[in-house]
Image (cartoon, rainbow, N blue to C red):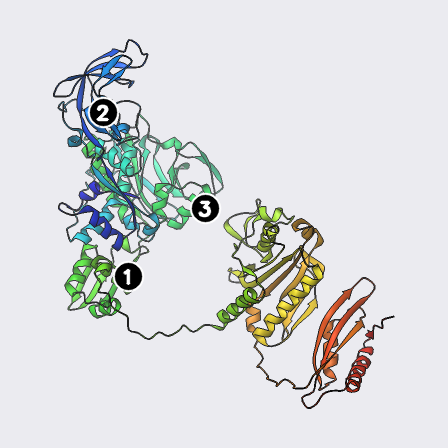
Amino acid sequence: MFVSMNWINDFVDLEGEDIEKLIHRFTLSTAEVEGIEYKGRDINGIVVGEILSCEDHPDSDHLHLLKVDAGDGIYDVVCGAPNARAGIKTAFAKVGAQVGDIKIKSAKLRGQISNGMCCSAKEIGISDDHSGIMELDLSLKNGTDLKEIFPIDDIIFEVDNKSLTNRPDLWGHYGMAREFAALTGKPLKELPVKEDDYEGDEVVDIDVRNKDYCYRYTGVRIENVTGKVSPMYMQIRLYYCGTRAINLLADLTNYIMLELGQPTHAFDGNRISRIVVDTPKTDIKFTTLDGNERDITTDTLMIYDNDTPVAIAGIMGGLDSEIVEDTDSVVLECANFDGVCVRKSAQRMGLRTDASARYEKTIDPEMTMEAAKRFIKLLSEIDEGAKCVTKINDVYVKHYPEITIDFDKAFVDRYTGIDISAERIKNTLISLGFKVSSDGEAFSVRVPSYRATKDISMQADIVEEITRIYGYDNFEIKTTRSPIIPAKMSLKRREENLIKDLLVKAYSMNEVHTRIWADPDELRDIGLSPEENVMLIQGSKEQETGILRTSMFESFLPLIYANRNYKPAFGIFEIGRTIHGVREDDTADERRTLAIGMYSKESTEKSLYFKAVELINTMIDELKHVKAVYKKTGVSHVWQHPKNTSLISVSGTEIGTINTLHPTTLKKISKNGAVVCIEIDMDALLSVEPVEFEFEEPSKFPGIDYDLTLLLPENVRFEAIENEVAALRIADLKKLSVIDVYDAEVIKNITVRLKFSSDERTLTSEEVQKSVDLILERLAAMNIKLKVLE
C-alpha cells in the first residue's frame, strides 16, 4: 500500500516534523515500511505557458511549430502532441528545466530550433496519460510555476501489506493519520463530511436478503452530475498511490477507498431502481467491468437491480451498470460484506481487487455512513450542481459487539517491566481513538469500532498499543532474571521425536512435508487418481482437485517418482494427516499418520522388504520394548501388492500396514527399482502401553549358534514357530531369529538361527543338540520339517 504524506497532512499537522524519522518511528511502532519515494524532486522549471500560435512543421507530417508565452518571454517550440493548438495553456519546460532524468536544452528538430518542451502529465510524473500535452485552466497566469498550482512535491512511502492484515483501519489514509497523530502527540482533525440536504421522504429501495454475508448497506441517489473530470490534485494523489484516473465518479469512489479504507461503488442511476443483496439460486454467467465473463456460483454474494445482477458484492461492478460519458445520475453504494465470503469468491474467480483486499480484512461497518457523507462532501465541492434526490438509506444488519477492557497500571508495569505513567497511558489510548475512563490507576477502556472487528480483544492487546506508541526503542535494556524451566514434553511429542531421530540417524532417511490434498496431475503420471474422499470447498469433483488424501502414499508415491533418478536408493518419511471420511458431528475424521517410503535400485524387493521389517521392529522395540507382529491382509488401495501387504500389530493393537507395490504401479514408477511402503497410525501406536525393561546380565561363557532351514506348509508364519518354541521354555535358548526366507510357488523355506548360552557354564554340543531335537519334534507336529541338504 502506498501512502501520501500530503494526504496525511490533511488530517494532522506535521509541520516542523522530520518526516524521514517519523516514518522510521512508524516502522517500529505500527507497520513495516518497504521504501520511501520523493515525488517531484526531479521536476523543476516547469511553468504555465500559453500557445499563441500553432503551425505545421514544413518537413514533418506530425510536428508543429509553436510560439509559447511563458510569462517572461515568447519561445519558439517544436511539438508533436496531437492536441497542440493556439489558445490553450499547457505545462511548459523552459531551457534549463528538469523533467525527470532530462535536462531541457535548446535543440534543432527537423531544421527548426526548439527552445523548450510542452509536457504531458506522464512526462511530469503525475499521471500515466501520454495522449497529449496537459491542458490547463485558462485563468492561470503565464509563467506560474506548476508546483505552485498542483501538489507535485510529495513523500510517498510503501507499507508491506502483510503487516496490515490485522489492522483494517490502516487501509486508508485517515487511519494512517491517526497513527501519526498518536506518534507526534498532535490532534487528529475531524473528517470533513456533508450531511444529505434532501428534505423529502424518497429513499433508495434496499433489500438485504442474505443477512449472513451482508452486514450493512448504505445507499443514496444523486442527480444532476455534470462534472466529468476529477480535479488535478485528486488525480495526482490517486496516481502516486497506484491508481489511475478514470472519470469524476470513479475517481471519487477510489479516492474515498484510499482515504478511509472503505470501498464504495457508483452505479449509473439511470439503470438502478431497486437494490437487492443476495446470492443467486443457480450458477450464472456475469460480465464484469473489465469485460470478462465470470462464472458465478450459488455462494457468491451479488448486487441486483430487482432481479438483474449488476455487481459482485465487494469485488467488482458489472459492465451494464458502469458509469459512462453521459451519466448524470448515480446510486452510491457504501456497504460492508463478510470478509470470508468476499475472499473465497475472489479466489474462486481469480479476481482480487483493491476493494476485495480491504473487505477480506474485516473492515469496520461504521465506516459506510462516513464514506457516503464524505462522497457527498467531495462531489458538492467539485460539482456544485449535483444534488441528493433521496435520503441516505442505511440498512444495518449486523452490529459487532462493543468491547470493554478493564486493567490497571500495575498490570502494564508488570507486563512491560517499565514504569509508564497513568497519565501517559490514558493520553496514548485516547489519541488512538479509545474511550477511556479511569479511577486512579484503574482503567476501563472501550475499544473503537475500527479496532474491534478482529484486532483488540484482551488486556495484552491494550498493553501492546501503549508500548508501541511509547516506543520499543525507549525501553531500558535489562538482563531478564527469571527461572529457566524447560518445557515439559508430551508423550506424543517425545515418541514423534524418537521416531524421527531413529529414521534420520540410524537409517539416513529424509523428512519431507507434503500437502494434505492429493494432486491429480502428479498421480496421473504414475497411472493413479485421487481416491474418493472429503474435498476442500474450492475443490472440483470433475477435475479431481482439492480431494483430501486417504493415505499418505497419495502424496509419497509421486514424490518417490519425481526423485527416482537423483539417487539409486533413498528413504523418506513424514508424520502428517490423512482424512477418512466424516464423523457424526460433520467434522473430518483426521488421523496422524507416519509414512515411510523406501526406494532402491540396488536391492531386490525382497531384501528391501526385510530391511523395512527390521526398521519397524527396531522402532517398536525402542518405543514399546515389545515385538511387532505381522499378518497378511487384503489391500485397501489399488497400488498395494495383493500378496505382499501385511497388517502390523503391537500388543494386540493394529497400528498400520507394510506393503510392496502392485506390479502395474511399480512399473510406472521404476522398471528396475523396488519400493516398500509403511503407514502407521500414530494415535494407535501411542495408545499401546510400553513394557517395562527387564535387565539381564549377559553370560560370561561362550554361546552356540544353531541354524535350521525349515520347510513350511501353506499359511504358517514365523510367529507360529516363535510361539511353539517359546512354549517349550528352554532356559538356555536366548534368541530365535529369521536369517533368510525362500518363497516360491511350490516350496517355502525359512532359515532360523537359535542362540544358546548358559549363565553358569559353557554348553556342550550334546546339550544343545538335545534342545534342537526337542524343537524339531515340536515343529513336526505342525508339519514343519527340517530341510536336509542332499
Looking at the image, tell me whether mark 1 or mark 3 is earlier in sequence order. Answer: 3
Q: Horizontal and vertical percent for residue 379? A: 22, 34
Provide the residue designation for mark 3.
Answer: 299
How many residues crowd around disc 3 within 10 Å: few (fewer than 14), some, or many (20 or more)? some
How many residues crowd around disc 2 within 10 Å: few (fewer than 14), some, or many (20 or more)? some
Q: Does the residue at mark 1 contact the one at mark 2 (Cβ under 8 Å)? A: no
Q: Nearer the viewer, residue 772 or 326?
A: 772
Which quadrant of the view contains residue 264? top left
Provide the residue designation for mark 2.
Answer: 104
Which quadrant of the view contains residue 224? top left
Foreground: disc 2 or disc 3: 2
| Number of marks | 3
Q: Horizontal and vertical percent for residue 93? A: 20, 24
Looking at the image, tell me whether mark 1 or mark 2 is earlier in sequence order. Answer: 2
Q: Residue furthest bottom?
A: 760
Element under label 1? helix
Provide the residue designation for mark 1.
Answer: 461
Residue 300 seen in this snapshot: no
Q: Horizontal and vertical percent for residue 504? A: 55, 64
Q: Residue furthest right?
A: 790
On screen, residue 252 above or below 545: above
Q: Amino acid at mark 3?
A: Asp
